[in-house]
Structure formats: structure tokens, C-alpha cells
Image (cartoon, rainbow, N blue to C red):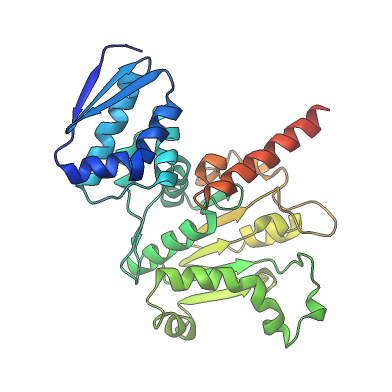
């Protein structure tokens, strides 16, 4: 890398304030991430020198472009952008990807390079497996893609399903009839729907059958044509359930299977995700996308927790 200084002109005091952050918090983040690089600010000009001068200057140029387009910088988002720049990935290309404009007027777009690969895989394949830890947006982005496909009339309906597997509680001890007992397991999928649609529209879509939320056991014996199907929490399926689900997929359908193999709640037996990439990896139209701690978009502490567990698992395997 060249050590020649690079200069970036920032057109406007409001943009400079946004780049630096409150009490220069964002500036310190960049300096801390690239410790062999010097960043100097004078007026509306940023001068960058040192080992990673070209890379950091490129980051600031992309940040200026994003802010001119109306994006706001915040620490968690900047941390993900820094990670991308270190991997020579384009920040601007990421933010140019729009999946959906929700019923609340918000825009759904990927927030990490891994999330963009995931969305691209969903769009380009019949079946996509999204595997990774909590907080990486696996389910939420899959629902966003499904809603967009329904709005564009690429599919006739959305089907969201999950295995009803106990995580510390048994179904028999929960109050109500069967659907009332199962409802807590499906609630995260309902929450995602209400995030994507106008809340008043969701009951109508459910009533018309354009959106269906059901436990995995209800899929047996059905052939699902013209549907966008999401199987969530797939680590809690058995091998037999996974095979049953995958063979339900009919003509004009697309399926996304999400799971986190570090959070298996099954009381016994192998997860339906175990070894599946080896078995199915060569099939055309099928993709496996693995998300990691860099793709966690919840509170920064969640990323640190994921990394700590990964390190503990690595240490345990090495001992």
C-alpha cells in the first residue's frame, strides 16, 4: 500500500459533522481500526496518510457519497463498513441494494457484505440455505424477499413455517388448544410480517390465504406451487422432516431455509441440517450462504457474544 497522503474534500459543514460523529466518535473509530494511518481534519478537508492511506481515503469517499444520498452514519453501521473495507468490499454497492420498501415507509437493504450475498442467492436460486448465528438477519431478510416477490406477483402466496420444538418448555404445559400452544413458536414470523406490511393488511392476507403461517408438521402431504416458502429455525428439524419439506417444493416456487447449528433445541437425534451441504451441495439451483459475526446487525455486544462462543468452541475442539 502507498504511504502517499490522500485528500478528501467534504462539501458542506453538515456532512463533515456527520462524518466525524458526536465529539469525533466516528473519527476515532476509523483511527482505531487503521492504527498505522493518520487522519487529519482541517476545515472541509480530510487528509489521510500512512500504510492504509488509500484504503481509508476510499472509505471516506464512499461515506461522503452515501451521506450525500441521504444516509446517516452511526457507530454500529460504521463498524460494519470498516470491516468491509478491510476485506476490499464496496460499501456503496451494498447500500445501493434495495430489497423492499415496507408498509411503514422504511427501506429494507442489506447491512453487511454477507447479507448482500444472502439476498443475491435468494434472488438467483430456487432453494437457499441461510446459516448463521442470531442477529444476522436470516429470517427478517428472507421475509422481506418473500414480501417483495408477492408484491411483484412473482409468487401467488407466502408460506412461513417452523418446527414446533421445545426450548425449555413442553407444549403440553402451555395453555389452550393446539394452535394456541404452537403460536409462541410462530410469533417471530408474525412479527416479521407486521414489520414488512401495513399492519391492517396482514389479517386480510392471512384470511385470503395469500400468507400462511403454520408449523412444519402441517406441510406433510402438500405440494407447494407458486409459493415463496420460508422454513425458519431449521436446525430443529430431523433429517426426515428436512427431506419432507424439501420435496414439497413445486413449480414456480422458491424456498429459503434458515438455521443456526449452534442453537439446536432438539432433545435427541441429529439436526436436519447436519451434513446437508455435503449431500446437496452439487445440485443446480440450490445455494448455501453462511453468515458470521461480521453480519450481526443487532447491538454490538451480540457480535462480541457470538465471537466469544465461537472462540470457546474452537478452544474446546483444540483441547
Viewer-side residue, 76 vs 66: 76
Tell me the quarter of the image containing the N terminus.
top left
Q: Measured from the top left, where is residue 287 in percent x and y?
A: 53, 44
Q: Measured from the top left, where is residue 68 in percent x and y?
A: 19, 45
Q: Measured from the top left, where is residue 158 in percent x and y?
A: 48, 70
**174 sits left or right of 41 in the view:** right
Tell me the quarter of the image containing the C terminus.
top right
Q: Locate residue 60: give its quadrant.
A: top left
Q: Residue reaching furthest left?
A: 11
Residue drawn at 39 percent across, 68 percent down: 150
Residue 104 in sight: yes
**287 sits left or right of 274 in the view:** left
Residue 131 in sight: no
Residue drawn at 63 percent across, 44 percent down: 306
Q: In the image, is residue 28 above or below residue 280?
A: above
Q: In the image, is residue 151 above or below residue 1?
A: below
Q: Locate residue 22: give its quadrant.
A: top left
Residue drawn at 53 percent across, 73 percent down: 190
Viewer-side residue, 251 vs 140: 140
Q: In the image, is residue 280 above or below residue 32?
A: below
Residue drawn at 37 percent across, 63 percent down: 148
Q: Measured from the top left, where is residue 31 in percent x and y?
A: 40, 28
Amino acid at each position: 500500500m502507498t504511504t502517499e497522503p490522500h485528500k478528501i474534500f467534504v462539501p458542506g459543514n453538515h456532512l463533515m459533522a456527520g462524518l466525524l460523529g458526536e465529539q469525533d466518535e466516528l473519527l476515532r473509530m476509523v483511527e482505531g481500526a487503521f492504527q498505522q494511518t493518520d487522519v487529519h481534519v482541517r476545515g472541509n478537508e480530510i487528509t489521510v496518510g500512512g500504510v492504509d492511506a488509500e484504503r481509508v481515503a476510499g472509505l471516506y469517499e464512499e461515506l461522503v457519497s452515501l451521506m450525500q444520498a441521504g444516509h446517516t452514519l452511526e457507530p454500529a453501521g460504521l463498524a460494519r463498513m470498516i470491516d468491509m473495507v478491510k476485506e476490499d468490499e464496496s460499501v456503496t454497492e451494498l447500500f445501493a441494494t434495495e430489497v423492499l420498501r415496507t408498509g411503514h415507509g422504511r427501506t429494507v437493504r442489506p447491512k453487511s457484505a454477507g447479507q448482500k450475498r444472502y439476498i443475491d442467492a435468494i434472488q438467483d436460486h430456487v432453494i437457499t440455505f441461510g446459516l448463521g448465528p442470531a442477529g444476522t438477519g436470516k429470517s427478517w431478510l428472507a421475509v422481506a424477499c418473500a414480501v417483495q416477490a408477492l408484491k411483484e406477483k412473482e409468487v401467488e402466496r407466502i408460506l412461513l413455517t417452523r418446527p414446533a420444538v421445545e426450548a425449555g418448555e413442553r407444549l403440553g404445559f402451555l395453555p389452550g388448544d393446539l394452535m394456541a400452544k404452537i403460536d409462541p413458536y410462530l410469533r417471530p414470523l408474525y412479527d416479521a410480517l407486521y414489520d414488512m406490511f401495513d399492519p391492517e393488511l396482514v389479517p386480510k392476507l392471512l384470511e385470503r390465504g395469500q400468507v400462511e403461517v403454520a408449523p412444519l408438521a402441517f406441510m406433510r402431504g402438500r405440494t407447494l406451487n407458486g409459493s415463496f416458502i420460508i422454513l425458519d429455525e431449521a436446525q430443529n428439524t430431523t433429517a426426515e422432516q428436512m427431506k419432507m419439506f424439501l420435496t414439497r417444493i413445486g413449480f414456480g416456487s422458491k424456498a429459503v431455509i434458515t438455521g443456526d447449528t449452534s442453537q439446536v433445541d432438539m432433545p435427541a437425534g441429529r439436526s436436519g441440517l447436519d451434513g446437508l451441504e455435503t449431500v446437496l451441495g452439487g445440485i443446480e439451483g440450490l445455494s448455501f450462504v453462511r453468515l458470521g459475526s461480521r453480519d450481526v446487525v443487532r447491538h454490538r455486544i451480540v457480535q462480541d457474544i457470538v465471537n466469544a462462543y465461537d472462540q470457546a468452541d474452537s478452544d474446546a475442539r483444540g483441547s
